[in-house]
Amino acid sequence: MEVLKRVDKQEELKKEVMELAKQIEQDDLKVVTFMEYTTPPEKIKPKVIKFEKVLPLLEKIAELGKIEKGVAKIMFYSPSTARNRGLTPTMMAGFQLLKPGASTKPHSHNMASIYFVFKGKGYSVIGNERIEWKAGDVFVVPANDIHYHVNTGDEDSILFDVTDSGLIESLGILEFRE
């Protein structure tokens, strides 16, 4: 058995059944005949995110403090992932900056997150557990656990996280709670 090369043949395949298909289709509902003959999604391109360009953005957002005082959060996505809003169809990555003494609001989401502590020290409360962290550490926040992060150091703390939000978003079930 060989892998089929996906080529869009929908117009050809639907030619003789178009009237029947049109009776089913609506603005937000289309008929696909034989999924293997549709155009595959756009290939995700390799990317590099330059931290020296990210840092000034994080610092400015934290300075403005419009959402959380002393906290900045940014995530990255590729338009080629469309609705998934990830860097890949299943994953999203981003940075958080916490000024000394700052903390994020307790919140939860139904996506899992893996954090790498890029700089600084502090702790996170995940569920009922307090986890101390410092530069170089990695920690995990399971889906649906209430959590928050606190910078206990004298310098900015920077966390890099990767989540499975692209997958959850593509299923249409991504949720955030405060």
Image (tube, grey):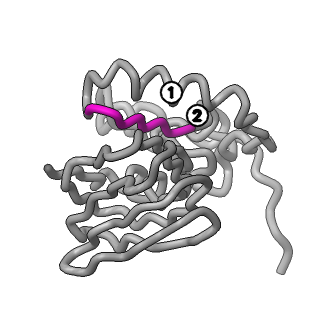
- Dividing the picture into quarters, in which one does residue 108 lie? bottom left
Please, what is the dominant secondary structure of the magenta stretch?
strand
x 41%, y 73%: residue: 132
**Residue 82: x percent and y percent?**
53, 36
Question: In this view of the protein, which residue sits in the foreground, 111 or 2?
Answer: 111
Is 21 one of the magenta-colored residues? no
Identify the amino acid type marked 2: Lys
Image height check: is 178 above or below 15?
Answer: below
Residue closest to the far right: 2
Question: In this view of the protein, which residue sits in the foreground, 143 or 70?
Answer: 70
State the extent of the magenta-drawn residues as a range: 69-76
x 21%, y 75%: residue: 127
**Residue 22: x percent and y percent?**
37, 31
Of mark 2 and mark 1, the one earlier in the sequence is 2
Per the image, label 2 sits on a secondary structure element best described as helix
x 75%, y 44%: residue: 43
x 30%, y 25%: residue: 65
Label 1 belongs to which residue?
Answer: 59
Question: In the rendered view, does 166 fall on the left or right side of 9?
Answer: left
Per the image, label 1 sits on a secondary structure element best described as helix
Residue closest to the far front: 154
Q: How many numbered markers are drawn?
A: 2
Image height check: is 144 above or below 18?
Answer: below
What's the distance in space between the residues labelled 2 and 1, CA to CA? 56 Å
**Residue 53: x percent and y percent?**
69, 26
Label 2 belongs to which residue?
Answer: 15
Identify the amino acid type marked 1: Glu
Report the mark closest to the observer, 2 or 1.
Answer: 1
